């Protein structure tokens, strides 16, 4: 069966048209929207979970179009672009068979850089050096060095140079190391600042002095980039470089969409090419817990697929069946690949909310007497675990220890965002715990839970991290030196820093790369925080004016990519790039030095760079 299917945004509504190629008796249309939706006309809502709907259609006649009008429950939830149209749709027939509907086109609206500005024009902003992030210091000299590859002289930094060479080769940039290449003298100088290096480029060769492995790696990445962006004629001069921030991160939501391991390795390669050093791996959320763990072997097995007949139905474009899991061997492969590139992996296990997959798999994490009717922001009931249930802490202790133990970073992210209003309010067990512990509000209870978990981890030598909400609560929230991620903006991060926490800034208005680039209805992406153009990724201050007192507490910057509307790996490429250039710039450079116009101009050079590494950054609508 090959029915025709189309859908368009019509004001606040979505109008879909289905034309079967044979007569169908009362089929059920299963689909997902960005949030809880309803049927206005053309069918009857049978059931729903979050943005997933099952709609009973009338009998359909072959070749006769049938129109269905849908809308989101929340009148503020106005469809912004094509990502908000029905995703993952299929028809279920009376005999139980399921038939996928054609996918609607995806893709961003984005001019090809290079169409707008030629690489020569892009040379101007940063002293002629086509390099993102730009170095802390650049002293140009006369002449150019003709180089396609380098021949290292000496053993210092050999391991880092080999890693950069492997990166260049597998990325499609060609060899960095070649015995026939121009001389590259390396020297270790521990007196240089941590992660720092000095590259002296002369017409006959290059000298790279670094403080350690990361410095050598950064210097080598600079060289392989300059070969590509200057077409083998590298400007002579001296680069003195070091990162401004220790945390230069990119997050990827692998729960809403399962990204294959090679896709993750490619993202790590891209991060390394931009000198980013933290990969925040979000493999657990309401929809799935994708990592293999020994302490709960059923957890990933029962949640890695979603769709027809699965623990979680086809929310967020899941369709008839979508998903996958990461075995421990694959996790080790990701960690090792990252480590060779100077990248540490931060794992995240989400509690207390965003835990529907836990609640549907592990018994006893909710109070059976809870009379609450709360709904999460994605429209899920029952998506929080209850800290008053003995099973909750008994289950989480070994789970968190096992996950943290798999990752050398020594930090575990505990989630703690978006607890739905009303959560635990109907739970007698939660009431009893609150009175026992002198807690009054929901935030107090959440803070108590987070502090308990963080304390247990601290005793095992593991530092906790969490989203900004984790510091709420009358008793100080999570405490325990937790690293806090400020995402709704920067205000919560500033407040957390003033409480004494280290903070990573990831304000959605600037570095949430799942936000659509533009307001164009033909574009693609979320819209709740902002439309995030390339310029927006750098036109902000990591340490806002008037916050110098907490500047030492701001340890870095991180881009985030949430996957609610991603149904194929390649779809994330044009969302990540070129905007990840801005994230890299904010993590590396002194912020005064780069504005959006500069970045737009330099991105012209990187269009060709992304093309060479096969990163589809301009997939047209
Ligand atoms: C978040 O974006 N809910 C951390």
Image (spheres, rainbow, N blue to C red):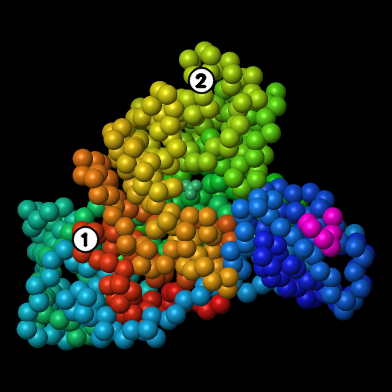
Q: Nearer the viewer, residue 440 or 223?
A: 440
Query: Is most of the magenta stretch helix, strand or loop?
Result: strand
Q: Position of residue 148 (x, y in %)?
A: 23, 84
What residue is shown with label 2? 440
Q: Which residues are magenta?
A: 39-44
Q: Residue at x 24, y 44 (%)?
A: 547
Q: Position of residue 226 (x, y in %)?
A: 23, 77
Q: Quadrant of the C terminus?
A: bottom right
**Count of labels shown?**
2
The local secondary structure at tag 2 comes to: loop
Q: CA distance from mark 2 to mark 1?
A: 44 Å
Around disc 1, counting alpha carbons within 10 Å, would you say few (fewer than 14), some (14 to 19), or many (20 or more)? few
Quarter of the view holding residue 425: top right
Whether residue 398 is situated above or below residue 263 in the rendered picture: above
Can you see residue 5?
yes
In the displayed image of the protein, which residue is found farthest to the top?
436
Whether residue 211 is situated above or below residue 287 in the rendered picture: below
Around disc 2, counting alpha carbons within 10 Å, would you say few (fewer than 14), some (14 to 19), or many (20 or more)? few
Q: Residue at x 34, y 30 (%)?
A: 480
Can you see residue 320?
no
Q: Residue at x 82, y 61 (%)?
A: 41
Q: Earlier in the sequence, mark 2 or mark 1?
A: 2
Q: Position of residue 351 (x, y in %)?
A: 52, 37
- Residue 43 belongs to magenta span: yes
- Residue 165 belongs to magenta span: no
Residue 592 — which label?
Answer: 1
Asked if residue 1 lies left or right of residue 609, the reply is right
């Amino acid at each position: 069966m090959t029915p025709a299917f189309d859908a368009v945004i019509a004001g606040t509504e979505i109008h879909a048209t289905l034309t079967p190629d044979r007569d169908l008796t009362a089929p059920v249309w299963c689909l997902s929207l960005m949030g809880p939706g309803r049927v206005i006309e053309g069918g009857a809502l049978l059931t729903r979970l979050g943005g997933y709907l099952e709609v009973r259609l009338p009998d359909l006649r072959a070749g006769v179009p049938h129109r269905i009008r849908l809308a989101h429950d929340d009148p503020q939830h106005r469809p912004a672009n094509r990502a908000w149209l029905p995703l993952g749709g299929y028809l279920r027939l009376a005999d139980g068979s399921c038939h996928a509907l054609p996918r609607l086109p995806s893709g961003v609206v984005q001019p090809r850089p290079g169409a707008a500005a030629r690489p020569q024009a892009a040379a101007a902003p940063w002293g002629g050096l086509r390099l993102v992030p730009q170095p802390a210091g650049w002293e140009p000299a006369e002449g150019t060095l003709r180089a396609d590859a380098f021949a290292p002289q000496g053993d210092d930094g050999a391991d880092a140079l080999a890693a950069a060479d492997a990166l260049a080769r597998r990325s499609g940039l060609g060899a960095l190391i070649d015995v026939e290449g121009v001389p590259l003298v390396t020297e270790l100088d521990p007196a240089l600042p941590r992660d720092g290096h000095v590259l002296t480029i002369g017409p006959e060769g290059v000298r790279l002095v670094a403080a350690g492995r990361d410095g050598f790696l950064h210097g080598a990445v600079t060289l392989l980039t300059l070969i590509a962006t200057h077409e083998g004629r590298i400007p002579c001069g001296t680069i003195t470089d070091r990162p401004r921030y220790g945390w230069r991160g990119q997050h990827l939501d692998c729960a809403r969409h399962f990204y294959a391991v090679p896709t993750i390795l490619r993202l790590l390669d891209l991060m390394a090419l931009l000198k980013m050093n933290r990969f925040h791996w979000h493999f657990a959320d309401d929809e799935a817990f994708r990592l293999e763990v020994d302490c709960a072997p059923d957890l990933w097995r029962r949640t890695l697929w979603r769709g027809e007949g699965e623990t979680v139905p086809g929310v967020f474009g899941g369709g008839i069946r979508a998903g996958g899991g990461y075995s421990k061997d694959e996790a080790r492969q990701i960690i090792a690949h990252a480590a060779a590139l100077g990248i540490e992996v931060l794992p995240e296990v989400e509690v207390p909310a965003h835990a529907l997959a836990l609640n549907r798999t592990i018994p006893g994490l909710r109070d059976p007497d809870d009379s609450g009717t709360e709904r999460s922001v994605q429209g899920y009931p029952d998506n929080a675990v209850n800290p008053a249930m003995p099973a909750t802490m008994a289950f989480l202790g070994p789970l968190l220890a096992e996950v943290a133990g798999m990752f050398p970073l020594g930090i575990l992210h505990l989630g703690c965002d978006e607890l739905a209003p009303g959560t635990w309010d109907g739970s007698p067990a939660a009431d009893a715990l609150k009175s026992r512990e002198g807690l009054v509000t929901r935030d107090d209870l959440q803070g108590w839970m987070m502090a308990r978990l963080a304390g247990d981890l601290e005793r095992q030598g593991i530092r906790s991290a969490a989203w900004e909400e984790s510091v709420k609560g009358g008793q100080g929230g999570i405490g325990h030196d937790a690293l806090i991620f400020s995402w709704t903006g920067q205000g919560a991060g500033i407040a957390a820093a003033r409480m004494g926490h280290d903070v990573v800034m990831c304000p959605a208005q600037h570095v949430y790369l799942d936000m659509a680039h533009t307001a164009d209805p033909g574009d693609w992406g979320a819209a709740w925080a902002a439309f995030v153009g390339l310029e927006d990724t750098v036109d902000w201050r990591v340490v806002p004016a008037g916050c110098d007192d907490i500047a030492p507490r701001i340890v870095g910057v991180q881009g985030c990519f949430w996957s609610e509307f991603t149904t194929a790996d390649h779809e994330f490429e044009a969302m990540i790039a070129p905007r990840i250039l801005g994230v890299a710039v904010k993590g590396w450079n002194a912020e005064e030095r780069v504005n959006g116009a500069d970045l737009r101009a330099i991105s012209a050079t990187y269009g060709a760079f992304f093309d060479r590494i096969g990163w589809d950054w301009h997939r047209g609508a």
